[in-house]
Image (cartoon, rainbow, N blue to C red):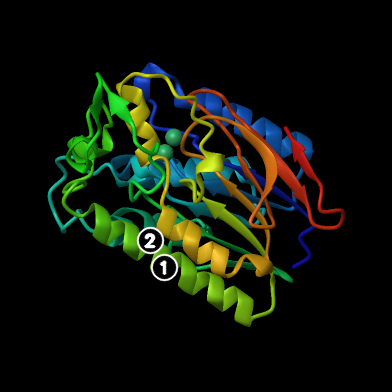
Amino acid sequence: MNVSKILFTADLHLNIDARSIDGRRILELFAEAVKRDNPDAVVVAGDLSTPSKASDHIALIRKAVGDRPLAVALGNHDFWTGNISGKDFHLLENTISAFWETPCRENGITLLDLENADWGETTIVGGYGHFDLGLAWPNLQLDGKPVTWEDYLAGKGWNDFRFIPGCAEFLEVNARAQADGIAERLDQAIDAKKRIMMALHTCPWPQLNGHPQSGSYRDLFTGYSGNSLVGKEIEKRSAYVEFLMCGHTHYRVKEQRLHGIPSLNVGADYGIFRAVIYDLETREIRWI
Ligand SMILES: [Fe+2]
Ligand SMILES: [Fe+2]
């Protein structure tokens, strides 16, 4: 398989009930971009939909991409099992196996949370990432008082704490598991001597979250923008990584070299399609 142009995007949020934005419009924009720019392969880095719509929406993503090689990572919204009963969804791996693994396999999609996408000499390594509060603003104060660990775990206004079961209680367990999984898959790609592109949902480093400091409770959200444990694992292996992208914060961060790796946040938002094309021949990044 000869892949030379890869389209990377994120945050499609195809759940059409999300904030009353019509997910079908974003799907149209996505399909148009794929048709127009004609990449050899496509990567979608998380916040695809929600677990209850996984089968339908994975099929729609496949349809938009045609028969090109396709890899997806999951995002925090893709773990919003809420009140769905069943397995212990406080462990993120159980949501992956219950909702996402089968539809991805049936549609010929590589689920980066479980395995790397090996496309010729290139491998896509990625996954969700989650958050460990390590990217929080240092010494943040709100209403004249220092923000505490407990304040962060109360998740004021941050819906993951309502819709991911045990989000606060299992935050550290899930953050560590995400970092370990990504490190393991990265090592596999390094051992295979592949050209490595990384696609993560959340940010590995604070420079990629694009957050302005607002002085309001929204500054807490920066703590949920990424996982510093993932960042540390990538830093140990940064010499082997050619390109890195993430999404999640819905703020665009243009490419910059972080730990030697050209890195960006694609910055797609509800109803707003954004993507980049990475050219493996020239190593150029083009925004579309
Ligand atoms: Fe998102
Ligand atoms: Fe997200």
Q: Is any atom of residue 94 visible in this view? A: no
- Residue highlighted by disc 2: 178
Tell me: 205 left or right of 194. Answer: left
The answer to which quarter of the image holds residue 221 is top left
Q: Label 1, secondary structure: give it.
A: helix
Give the SS element for disc 2.
helix
Question: Considering the image in quadrants, where does the N terminus appear?
Answer: bottom right
Quadrant position of residue 273: top right
Q: Is mark 2 within 8 Å of ligand 2?
A: no
Residue drawn at point x = 25 percent, y = 33 percent: 147
Residue at left offset 62%, top offset 65%: 238
Amino acid marked by disc 1 = Gly
Where 159 sits versus 85, above or below?
above
> Which of 134 and 27 lies nearest the eye of the viewer?
134
Work out which quarter of the rendered image holds the C terminus and state it. top right
Residue 209's spot in the image, x, y percent? Answer: 51, 37
Horizontal and vertical percent for residue 72?
Answer: 51, 52
Nearer the observer, 220 or 186? 220
Mark 2 nearby-residue class (10 Å; few <14, some 14–19, many ≥20): many
Left or right side of 157 for 275: right
- Which residue is found at the position 25% from the left and 31% from the top? 146
Q: Residues within 10 Å of mark 1 (few under 14, many from 20)?
A: some
Which residue position is annotated with label 1? 181
Q: Position of residue 6 (x, y in %)?
A: 71, 51
Please, what is the three-letter code of the amino acid marked with disc 2? Gln
Q: Position of residue 188 (x, y in %)?
A: 55, 77
